[in-house]
């Protein structure tokens, strides 16, 4: 039997993206956080173009120019934010540092997320012994302090292969260390939402169709657990940047020739009370603003992707 | 005098600077000891009406205009303390899910005693005695042992009985029961309905039963209000509404029931579904689904008029009554002339 | 009509309630023993579903009717018993061997808000099973098939690129039915498909299901607690209580002369529209949970006619002269009908 055309039911209107976009425009704080984050990303991407000085230039480091205060104090037209102890233009160093910090943060979290999503999906979907085994692994990982693992690992690496070798591969090693230590957070969150989604009837419907478990996991369940992933993703990037900064501050991070925000702060800290406060304070403020923007964004996403406030 | 009278109540929901009407010009009265039912599909606004009577609608909803009077005292302008006095003591509510009211970490006895002692100054022992007596009244076997149990130790039907007992503690004048049996099995539903009915009869409590099930309503209520898209479309004695529905929506609702058609035949369905609040049609809200809709229905909002035993908001019936009235004097003149 | 499509024999299913492996060990009188608690959802169900019929399974919460559906569809493994499809045993097949039967048997679910993947458009939802089972279709054929399917369940084809949350409950249930029909099955299990819908929408969906049955000679296993729907829709009715079938009868026979004491109580409890019907039969107590495999009749604890034999032996389901089958000692002995 065919239904006459006028009897056919037209769907209701409204879409999910509209909801998110209009929510974002409505919330000024979230909008501000997003603008700040996008600004940081752009600056990081375009650092070589925007920076007034080129880091690779041997002229860049000029000890004659060291410790010049920011322009509004010294009146020196060349250096907007002054120079550091090595005579580098602080603005350029911060731009490159932001680029490094963000790269490390994002790459580390990508590793965390990939590992965590795969492990969490498997644990939640198959359940039983696989679940028990994987989650006990996560517990063991969580029972070590991440910072401690990173410190021990980096210290051993430095003493085994020597400082020069370490400095060459510092970035990759930092990404790996931060990436590999924090996956349980993702795995646990994913597992929890997979357990909830697995109960839903659309998963049964897919299984009844005979669709294989890998496809059910990645095609059907994973997209429905994306909201919590997105939230942790933003907050974890902030955490990874902070972790990198902390490690650099302890002298286990990026070398002085390739400074990240953390190593800049660490370096500047020595001059903090000798009058050159700007070398430490300005990178710190940059870092704090970035972290705050990321956290605000994460919070806002959590509120707005919450199924209780938005039913789909 | 009416115990409760709601007149011209409008409730709106504020969604993103746009206010959507959830209840439009709702008026009804309730006498002491009377049992009425509010019937409608999900989204008709029946629960909103139940909540707004005790001024419990949370944000983004608010009462835009109209008045709700309990014993001639206005409820809409009361402050929180006066309202709390009314809620529970005068008007009690029963929800679909008993766990909405019961606290899972406190024993049933503790919760019941708490309710009594928060409203009256009384010793724990006396309060416990009252609680056990009420548990007995709702036919809970061995109330003394149940008193110390936790909500999760009881079945769904038993929990609903405990809720009814807790409602009885303060001897309210009105019980508002919002789909009290929807979550229960048929056999348990029948028992809970009988219990509610017995309690209302024995204590002279008025009942507002909110339900989507006309079968349930016919068992309990004396008078029925049918709601559609935030408006009352028909009001009358329950028997009258079931046997002789006037409004096309009520007719459709009754005809859609499986028992109204011969087994194995197609059911009489109403086309389409209830519009969401944001897409309320103009004129009579039911016109897109109404088999008798005319051009006038699309523009004109029908008035709520009294026709015989029940009241209806429908243009078709309004016109029929008008015609009848117009014809009537002529007819009677003819009769008179004939007699002469 | 009289070809048996699905045959179920002695089906049992027990769920373990302490599923963590460590939780199963108990320290008892000096010995460490492994100990599994389980809930018996199905306790020996025998059922035959004939071609083209609608078999309604009625029962209260916890009687195992949803488990029955899930076991038939292969979503959970039975503990014991067998299921045949047209004489082929299917309950022990692995995923690949079962593929042929997946196309023949489909399911419609209870909750219209959870049975469609919220992140897939209607087109994706429908195209996945079709292209999975008929990989040879061209994209034009696929589009045509999906448009045809949608229109046949009364949804405009323009809605195919919309997401489920843009549809109302009744519409989603239509899409669910379209998905089940997309692989052209001849047997559909419907697990309470109407209970989340409004009365007027229930009628629409029920009509649609009846139309499809007529059109495609479908057989339904319709699981519900709403006896009014059963009375309208069923060919035969099976009444379940605590994982057993206590009465199985053609619809008219069941509603005219219910035999089992539980069926009688259930029928009397339906809230009818007329206000004159008799008071419902009150059953003692509530449905117990079956953590122990019950000895004797499952209904003994609440049955007003129970005697010693009911506590000891489980009644077998026996055919009655009027075509119904009942499992009750009291009826067998003529204690109930003098």
Image: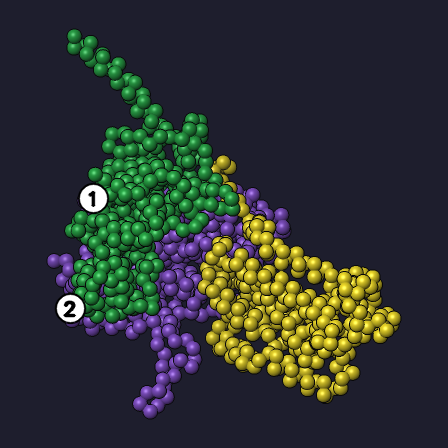
x, y percentage for residue C86?
Answer: 42, 60
Give the chain of mark 2.
C
Q: Is residue A108 left or right of residue B234?
A: right
| Disc 2 to disc 1, C-alpha distance | 48 Å
Q: Which mark is residue B32?
A: 1
| Residue C201 point in image, percent of width and height | 40, 45
Q: What residue would you read off at disc 2? A: C307
In the figure, the purple chain has which letter? C
Which quarter of the image is occupied by the C terminus of chain C? bottom left
Q: Residues within 10 Å of mark 1 (few under 14, many from 20)?
A: some
Identify the residue shown where x is 73% and y is 63%. Answer: A44
- Res B264 → quadrant: top left
Mark 2 element type:
loop
Answer above or below: position of C281 versus A284: above
The green chain is B
Q: Which residue occupies the extreme bottom position in the image?
A: C30
The percent position of residue C41, horizontal first and vertical second, equals 34, 68
Taking the image as shown, residue B288 lies to the left or right of residue A166, namely left
Which residue is at a point 36% across and 71% down the rendered structure image? C14
């Amino acid at each position: 039997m065919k239904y006459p055309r006028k009897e056919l039911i037209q769907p209701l209107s409204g879409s999910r993206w509209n909801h998110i976009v209009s929510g974002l425009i409505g919330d000024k704080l979230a909008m501000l956080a997003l603008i700040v984050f996008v600004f940081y990303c752009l600056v990081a991407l375009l650092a070589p173009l925007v920076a007034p000085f080129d880091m690779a230039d041997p002229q860049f480091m000029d000890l004659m120019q060291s410790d010049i205060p920011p322009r509004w104090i010294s009146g020196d037209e060349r250096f907007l934010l002054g120079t550091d102890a090595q005579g580098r233009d602080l603005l350029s160093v911060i731009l490159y540092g932001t680029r490094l910090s963000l790269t490390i943060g994002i790459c580390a979290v990508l590793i965390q997320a990939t590992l965590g999503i795969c492990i969490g999906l498997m644990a939640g979907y198959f359940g039983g012994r696989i679940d028990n085994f994987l989650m006990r692994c996560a517990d063991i990982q969580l029972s070590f302090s991440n910072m401690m693992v990173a410190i021990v690992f980096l210290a051993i690496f430095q003493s085994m292969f020597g400082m020069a070798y370490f400095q060459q591969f510092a970035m990759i090693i930092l990404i790996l260390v931060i990436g590999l230590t924090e996956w349980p957070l993702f795995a646990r969150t994913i597992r929890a939402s997979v357990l909830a989604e697995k109960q839903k009837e659309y998963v049964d419907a897919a299984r009844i169709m005979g669709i294989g478990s890998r496809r059910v996991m990645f095609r059907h369940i994973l997209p429905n657990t994306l909201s919590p992933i997105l939230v942790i993703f933003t907050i974890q990037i902030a955490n990874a940047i902070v972790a990198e900064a902390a490690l650099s501050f302890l002298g286990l991070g990026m070398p002085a020739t390739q400074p990240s925000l953390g190593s800049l702060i660490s370096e500047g800290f020595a001059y903090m009370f000798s009058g050159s406060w700007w070398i430490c304070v300005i990178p710190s403020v940059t870092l704090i603003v970035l972290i705050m923007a990321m956290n605000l964004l994460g919070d806002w996403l959590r509120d707005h992707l919450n199924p209780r406030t938005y039913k789909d | 005098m009416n115990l409760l009278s709601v007149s011209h109540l409008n409730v709106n929901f504020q969604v993103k600077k746009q206010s959507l009407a959830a209840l439009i010009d709702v008026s009804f009265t309730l006498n002491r000891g009377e049992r009425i039912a509010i019937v409608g599909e999900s989204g008709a606004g029946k629960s909103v009406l139940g909540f707004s009577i005790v001024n419990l609608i949370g944000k983004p909803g608010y009462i835009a205009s109209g008045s709700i009077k309990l014993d001639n005292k206005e409820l809409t302008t009361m402050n929180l303390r006066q309202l709390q006095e009314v809620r529970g003591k005068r008007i009690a509510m029963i929800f679909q899910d008993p766990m909405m009211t019961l606290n899972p970490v406190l024993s049933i006895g503790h919760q019941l005693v708490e309710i009594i002692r928060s409203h009256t100054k009384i010793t724990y022992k006396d309060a416990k005695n009252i609680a056990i007596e009420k548990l007995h009244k709702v036919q809970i076997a061995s109330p003394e042992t149940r008193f110390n149990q936790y909500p999760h130790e009881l079945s769904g039907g038993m929990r609903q009985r405990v809720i009814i007992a807790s409602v009885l503690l303060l001897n309210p004048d009105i019980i508002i029961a919002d789909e009290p049996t929807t979550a229960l099995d048929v056999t348990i539903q029948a028992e809970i309905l009988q219990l509610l009915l017995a309690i209302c009869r024995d204590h002279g409590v008025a009942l507002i039963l909110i339900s989507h099930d006309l079968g349930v309503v016919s068992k309990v209520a004396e008078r029925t209000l049918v709601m559609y898209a935030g408006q009352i479309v028909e009001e009358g004695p329950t028997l009258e509404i079931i046997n002789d529905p006037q409004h096309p929506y009520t007719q459709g609702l009754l005809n859609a029931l499986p028992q109204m058609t011969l087994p194995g035949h197609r059911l009489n369905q109403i086309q389409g579904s209830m519009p969401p609040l944001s897409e309320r049609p103009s004129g009579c809200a039911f016109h897109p689904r109404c088999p008798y809709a005319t051009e006038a229905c699309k523009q004109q909002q029908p008035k709520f008029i009294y026709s015989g035993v029940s009241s209806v908001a429908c243009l078709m019936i309004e016109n029929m009554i008008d015609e009848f009235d117009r014809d009537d004097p002529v007819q009677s003149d003819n009769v008179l002339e004939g007699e002469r | 009509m009289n070809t048996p499509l699905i045959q179920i024999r002695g089906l049992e299913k027990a769920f373990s309630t302490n599923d963590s492996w460590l939780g199963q060990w108990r320290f008892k009188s000096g010995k460490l023993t492994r100990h599994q608690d389980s809930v018996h959802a199905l306790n020996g169900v025998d059922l035959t579903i004939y071609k083209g019929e609608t078999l309604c399974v009625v029962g209260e919460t916890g009687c195992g009717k949803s488990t029955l559906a899930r076991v038939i569809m292969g979503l959970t493994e039975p503990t014991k018993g067998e299921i045949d499809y047209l004489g082929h045993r299917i309950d022990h097949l692995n995923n690949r061997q079962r593929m042929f039967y997946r196309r023949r048997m489909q399911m419609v679910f209870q909750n219209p808000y959870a049975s469609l993947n919220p992140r897939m458009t209607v087109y994706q939802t429908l195209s996945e099973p079709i292209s999975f089972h008929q990989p040879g279709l061209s994209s034009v054929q696929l589009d045509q098939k999906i448009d045809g399917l949608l229109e046949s369940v009364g949804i405009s084809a323009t809605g195919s690129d919309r997401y489920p949350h843009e549809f109302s409950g009744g519409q989603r249930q239509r899409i669910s039915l379209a998905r089940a029909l997309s692989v052209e099955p001849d047997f559909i299990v419907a697990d309470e498909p109407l209970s989340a819908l409004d009365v007027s929408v229930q009628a629409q969906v029920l009509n649609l299901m009846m139309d499809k049955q007529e059109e495609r000679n479908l057989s339904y296993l319709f699981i519900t607690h709403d006896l009014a729907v059963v009375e309208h829709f069923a060919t035969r009715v099976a009444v379940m209580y605590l994982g057993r079938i206590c009465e199985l009868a053609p619809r008219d026979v069941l509603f005219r002369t219910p035999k089992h004491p539980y069926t009688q109580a259930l029928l009397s409890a339906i809230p009818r529209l007329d206000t004159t019907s008799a008071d419902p039969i009150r059953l003692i107590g509530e449905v117990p949970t079956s953590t122990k495999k019950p000895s004797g009749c499952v209904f003994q604890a609440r049955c007003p006619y129970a005697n010693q034999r009911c506590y000891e032996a489980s009644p077998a389901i026996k055919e009655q002269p009027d075509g119904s089958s009942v499992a009750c000692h009291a009826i067998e002995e003529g204690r109930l009908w003098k």
